[in-house]
Image (cartoon, coloured by chain):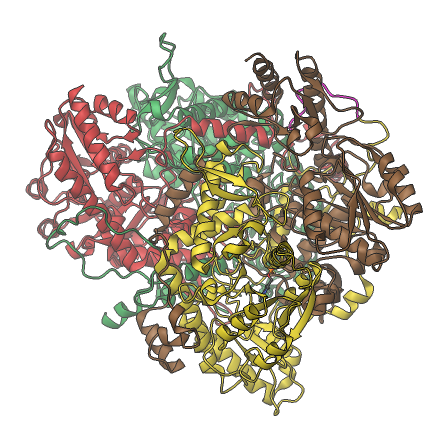
Chain colours: A brown, B red, C yellow, D green
Amino acid sequence: MAYIPHTERDRQAMLAAVGVGSLDELYQAVPRDVRFPDLDLPEPLSEMEVMAEVQALAEANVDTRHYACFLGAGAYNHFIPSVVDHILRRNEFYTAYTPYQPEVSQGTLQSIFEYQSLICNLTGMDVSNASHYDGATALAEAVTLALAHHRGKRSTLLLSPAIHPHYRQVVRTYMQGMQVKIHGDESCCTGPDDLIRRLDDQTAMVAVQYPDFFGHVADFRALAAAVHAAGALLCVVVNPLALGLLKPPSAFDADVVVGEGQPLGIPLSFGGPYLGLFTTKNEYVRKMAGRLVGQTVDSRGQRGFVLTLTPREQHIRREKATSNICTNQGLMALASAVYLSVMGKQGLRKVAELCYHKAHYAAEAIRRVPGYGVWNEGEFFHEFVAKCPKPVAEINEILLEHEIIGGYDVGTDYPELKDHMLLAFTEMNSKEEIDDLVSALEEASHD
Amino acid sequence: MAYIPHTERDRQAMLAAVGVGSLDELYQAVPRDVRFPDLDLPEPLSEMEVMAEVQALAEANVDTRHYACFLGAGAYNHFIPSVVDHILRRNEFYTAYTPYQPEVSQGTLQSIFEYQSLICNLTGMDVSNASHYDGATALAEAVTLALAHHRGKRSTLLLSPAIHPHYRQVVRTYMQGMQVKIHGDESCCTGPDDLIRRLDDQTAMVAVQYPDFFGHVADFRALAAAVHAAGALLCVVVNPLALGLLKPPSAFDADVVVGEGQPLGIPLSFGGPYLGLFTTKNEYVRKMAGRLVGQTVDSRGQRGFVLTLTPREQHIRREKATSNICTNQGLMALASAVYLSVMGKQGLRKVAELCYHKAHYAAEAIRRVPGYGVWNEGEFFHEFVAKCPKPVAEINEILLEHEIIGGYDVGTDYPELKDHMLLAFTEMNSKEEIDDLVSALEEASHD
Amino acid sequence: MIEPLIYDLSSPGRLGVSLPETDVPPHALPEGLVREDLPLPEVAELDVVRHFVRLSQLNHAIDTGFYPLGSCTMKYNPKVNEDAARLTGFAFTHPLQEGSTVQGNLALMYSLQEWLKEIAGFAAVSLQPAAGAHGEVTGILIIRAYHRHRGDAKRTKILIPDSAHGTNPASTSMAGLQVVELPSDARGNIDLEALRRACDDTVAALMLTNPNTLGLFEEHVREVVDQIHACGGLVYGDGANMNALLGVVRPGDLGFDVLHFNLHKTFSTPHGGGGPGSGPVGVAAPLADFLPGPVVEAVEENGSEEAPLYRLVMPAQSIGRVKAFLGHFGMHVRAYTYMRMQGKSGLRAISDHAVLNANYLRARLRDTYHVPFDRICMHEFVAEGRWEQAPGVRALDVAKRLMDFGFHPPTNYFPLIVHEALMIEPTETESKETLDAFVQAMKTIAQEARDDPEILHNAPHTTPFGRLDEVRAAKELVLCCRPVEMEKAG
Amino acid sequence: MIEPLIYDLSSPGRLGVSLPETDVPPHALPEGLVREDLPLPEVAELDVVRHFVRLSQLNHAIDTGFYPLGSCTMKYNPKVNEDAARLTGFAFTHPLQEGSTVQGNLALMYSLQEWLKEIAGFAAVSLQPAAGAHGEVTGILIIRAYHRHRGDAKRTKILIPDSAHGTNPASTSMAGLQVVELPSDARGNIDLEALRRACDDTVAALMLTNPNTLGLFEEHVREVVDQIHACGGLVYGDGANMNALLGVVRPGDLGFDVLHFNLHKTFSTPHGGGGPGSGPVGVAAPLADFLPGPVVEAVEENGSEEAPLYRLVMPAQSIGRVKAFLGHFGMHVRAYTYMRMQGKSGLRAISDHAVLNANYLRARLRDTYHVPFDRICMHEFVAEGRWEQAPGVRALDVAKRLMDFGFHPPTNYFPLIVHEALMIEPTETESKETLDAFVQAMKTIAQEARDDPEILHNAPHTTPFGRLDEVRAAKELVLCCRPVEMEKAG
Ligand SMILES: Cc1ncc(COP(=O)(O)O)c(C=O)c1O
Ligand SMILES: Cc1ncc(COP(=O)(O)O)c(C=O)c1O
């Protein structure tokens, strides 16, 4: 029995202390007819056998360490400095619980405080929570914040169609029990002006993405002014890595900024665990979901940190809490804090610029391949949509033969954009890889 | 400049404090004509580039996680519980120096004390040092101990031919400047009786291996009695993993026990770093090479540990030291301490038995393959020599096609044993792998 | 020595990492959209390492000592799970890759779904939810969708016992349903009379934690379930306490309709200082179509050797996605590895020893600490941290004093129905020796409470920090620090 | 709390790891050769983890704080090196595999050989030696073999300055040669007159550490080398201090004939609490054939595409093997990774900043601590830990008191030619901020030495352990503990 330290002697002594004769006797309260089911599960494996098995499973995949990857669409193949995982492996970090007892949890607490600070400084916002599940759920909870802010008096939500389709789906999932009207994203390609036109006195919040799902970057100042004039809140979904280069959403006077923190030092890991960023202005802090760490002093006069404003949370306020979130993404928040620390001011800027330059180099090249085109108009960051001469799935199959993981089929979510492929570029894509992609695309158009 | 924290401002302030105008000025004492050579070295790579490069190098190899491995001959492909590397990755362990300052090094010191204890209990010996470079150098230094013990009055060394050929070579390398006569290993297949016959009043030490290079295990009591009767010391080179099953060399009254600790939780790593075990009886402790940790108390009355008997060592005794060893294999000693702790009494026995059973299953099967035979007579542990119908290199080439790393060509070191292959079996070799080996061997004999 | 903040270590121009120069021609940066400042620290890799290594040492963790935090199942996290999750083929796969290129991942997820179904007695499982609370809101939304699909829109109430975890009512509200609280009876069970009164055709479901947060198995579980089903409601199980039930009883066999698992409790994925967790949801057959997706299904043989064996599908009536991608795959790998090592026999042993350990502590402490519901418990129990003879002493004092003995305190002040609650969950991975040392410390503290209460009030004494001023934190609300330059500027 | 010994945690029957049952028929165990008892501990994986995690926290390490241990080059160990060494293709290759199956390993070793040759100006390198001292004995054996190969067997003396590290004379003895000690002059150089007197046709070599252990570059290095060469001897370089010379000067260009590198110093492979290190040896062309082997060579093109590009060979006149296999390959991977990231410019920057840091500390401390050889130093310098005004205070007291400030002490009592030596090597990876804090602590201590010497004598105060009784350790000689059963039995 792996990981159970009891010897037979221990067991006997303990049963005697409890006053029962056997382990089975501990379960008298369990209905007899369903007690001790005979589970149909595999036999136990030893550690060496299980490692061989999981290694075989892992190697049954194609991975981004062996294939060039141009797939993004909300999860990105970035360089992760070695030091990030070395810190995550610290036993004291990853085997601790939520820091409910601050005297023996200052390591976690100070790290979260630093995470909050780094994210505030990156986004330009006043306050960051200690993390949310992912970018999509953070957006959904931003909606909850807006509804709470308006105390039920406004119940319309405007979503830009250029927000990640999954995020919009998650918002709708979360809101299905609420009396909320969600619109704005009916067609793929309407812009901020369309959102402005739809604003009214029922609008609780308007949400846009920056860079958007198609890679575009645009100035949202006019939108923000209109949103605020209409008495609504503006939520911006960000890719935090892009903020290494781009103006922070605070420059547009965003009220809530959420986003997916995965690009900040978190492995792709087939979709999770990632990191939901959730930041806002000071005035909305009491409506915010999730944990917050605040600075204080201890009984010896030392600066220290505690969980604070807990009356927002479920364990105090129960059904009146701002959110049900309890377990969050603590270790992923730590990963991004380490990442942002080690990349620093210059490193993050440089990575963002590398992504930008590579994407633009690729766009120029793909534009020249017969049959293909660049769908995007205006500025984009590190992703763009390529018009393709045939179905994306067929092209991707050919790319795989060249050990290339191709882009995302935008037609899946936007029927108008059939045969359009969303391609992402990061510092991990060398010029050689991009050139290979371009010639493989060309080849694919012939077949 | 990776890993150098100096900003330009720091540099200027520091140069000013030193009183020089530039970094170059710091090197006035260096002859001008050879100062600042223009080195022909590659340009620096960033972390992500270097990781891609080393990954490509690593994957240019065939490894034992992807091929079945039957190669042993002194380095073995054993299961290493995950916990071992998790402990080695503790920053406080691997980035500390030798524990010269015990007040801030109790982690290392207690670990080494435990290592010494585990190795003593495993070998049955009184005292273990804190590690030596590897099994071969430990044997060479055991010879030095014997020579010192006899104070120059005896200068003959008898080596069993069944000691690992590399070890015997290393002994000869170490002894080339000494007036030492080394013999006993002229022919591959002489046994202890031959060593007994050669004993005389010049014999300082007799060394044998257990299990020997060919896998044999034998009782050395008669040899020990003869050696002691002749006034010489008996050194036994062990595979410590085999001692999970076999009688410890203390049962033969060995005076010095050395060996290669690699099987105890240390990866193959293309030959190193490994772990030299070095143990002896109390009476020889002051002649022993290497560091020793001893128990004591601190100024507050707490039990603690320090480096002790340092007057044997080079930093105190200089040319009169028992050895020149300074840096040893500290972290590898820790690995084996963690390994032995987590395997424990039952685990080590079980692993040793698995090795034993698998090797004997294989021997039975190979014996039946036409053209092959088992050369060994008598008991063996987890290795044996297979007689082959053609050159070992040719057979191994065919095995490689079956994703099998074949055995060691014994003919390399023992010309008498041309076309003989030393095969090793561990708990990592499943029955299926062994069956595959057997049929591949059969196939190889046909080609 | 207080560890400075990472921003305090910053020096202009210092670099933490080496990056390549661009190998493509640079492109003009987007006009008007480039930020002027980027207020991140400038530190070296060594600074970062020292900083976080030192910080880590300020934590209590499972790997440094006993952590009997009730409701949290702080069991040992096997190291092999960490290795498995970091395998290249797992850690570096993109969630939107073609199914044919991620068959290993899908196979693993499929097995995990199957095992969870088998362990809890359900027809289908979705691995998407990120944590327990996320599983709860998912489950409530499933229940809501199910009723509405049946054309029954009036079921808007969720019954929740007063002993329930705060996430239960909070999740209910988030799903847009109303909470109706149910009292507990003198034995710690649901008050059956109150239940009966609450049951009507507006009840969507009962949320039941079983064993409940007192660590007690609901003695009338069959009646409770039948009662709810009789009025047309469903039973939601909060599976946070599954560590007591592995191979002991399957919630599905007891009539539960929905249940979330906490892989970060029962299946030993580490807590990470607060997360990430993983909260898969299992459901009975009638609810299977409502699960969030995608889920993994095994593809029927279609004659082709090359066909992928597993694929992702969206359940027919799915409530939708609850997360951007596929759930916390990294946690799925860890849980898979853990369960694969346990097998059937190992799982039962987990619960047996978790329950044995809790009862052993209860038996050894009940004379010293009042245990309000004192009967055979499951994997945890609740004692009171107060004595008549020590009027000023509170559970908090006991908790803080325990730190001086090297133990993490139990959960305090939960469940709410016990005064000065100390909720103790030892888990199966702790040895009798550790439990005995804990008992010894608890007894010493009980004695000190009478003899020398100040030592408790001023505790902890031996930790790197003393008690923290929480009032000040909430009043001053310093939630973020700015780099020195910004502070000067702003 | 004192951490118990691992044996103290043992309980009969407890298991730490799960292992498979045999899948082959068991074979009868060898009669008379099976041991009866196996006195190893019986503990759970959790016990092991807690035990060693707690122990680790008792260490000072580079990753927890400044470690200015002279002669040890305690620079930061980049984390990427650790990842590289653990790559499956490296960590799980057997040293006796066919060359064709380990071309990646051989390519890496070949590059490392080439780079070390280039950096130090030599014709050939062997990576086999395990550490610095191992490199020394190897080098001396090469020198011996070279002379004998020339038919010159009378050269049996090795000249060694009195400032040399203890391994130099010890290695000489081990190789069977005689040590002749040379005094240093007032500026810390070799006394040229004494050298001249010692030079004759019995001299096999001079062992020179340059910069020497005072951190000083030998000002007459050309004269010294010429002198030795003139009498037919060779010059051996102790490369422990190469961190000062990267891109600054190549020992080969200065006329050195042999030199060992310490990859665990200059090239940042971690020290591991005492080892493993790696001590490659480089030699000038006439000595190349005497290197220990095997070494890696690039195979000449032979027309075949399939041919392996690298292979292992034994140098023609090799002194033989100095180790069972190929050297510390795991360390080679780390050093390779490190050097590859530095490139030419990075290597020079290492030395520049190592030297700058040492001189900065020297400049800032020279008014407070007597620096006996006070001139521009290289990567380290030696101060004295004594003052006339504080007669009872010794270097040891300063060392112990530094611990209270969170710093590891400098090397004490070495080199032997300085009284109460404090040998300070900051390395290039430490920032000015760290050095300034160290200066501050050193100055405070110097003041305390005069004002309140007891605070030094009783130091350290804030570490988990106070001063240890070394005399008692040597007297009682408890070097090993036995399990409880054995103690009872025996
Ligand atoms: C009984 C119970 N229910 C629900 C939860 C919520 O789970 P999570 O923290 O994973 O969201 C917890 C966790 O603390 C719990 O103990
Ligand atoms: C100057 C000098 N020479 C030689 C050595 C010996 O090197 P190693 O410890 O690697 O054997 C050292 C190491 O401390 C040293 O500082």
In the rendered structure, does residue C21 fall within the stretch colored magenta? yes
> Principal SS element in the magenta part?
loop
Give me the residue at 37% from left, 44% from top. Answer: B266
Residue farthest to the front, as pictured: C151
Residue farthest to the right, as pictured: A229
Q: Is residue C251 above or below residue A275?
A: below
* A196 relative position to B368: left or right: right
Between residues B113 and D457, which one lies in front from this camera angle?
B113
x, y percentage for residue D136?
Answer: 40, 34
| Quarter holding residue B114 | bottom left
x, y percentage for residue B142?
Answer: 26, 45
Stretch in magenta: C20-29
x, y percentage for residue B138?
Answer: 30, 43
Q: Quadrant of the N terminus of chain B?
A: top right
Q: Is residue A3 above or below residue C102?
A: below
Q: Quadrant of ligand 1?
A: bottom right
* D159 relative position to D254: left or right: left
Residue A224 visible in the snapshot: yes
Residue farthest to the bottom, as pictured: C389
Between residues A289 and D177, which one lies in front from this camera angle?
A289
How many numbered marks, from 0 up?
0
Between residues B43 and A78, which one lies in front from this camera angle?
A78
Residue C78 visible in the snapshot: no
* A382 relative position to C104: left or right: right
x, y percentage for residue B123?
Answer: 25, 54
Q: Quadrant of the C terminus of chain B?
A: top left
In the rendered structure, does residue A173 fall within the stretch colored magenta? no
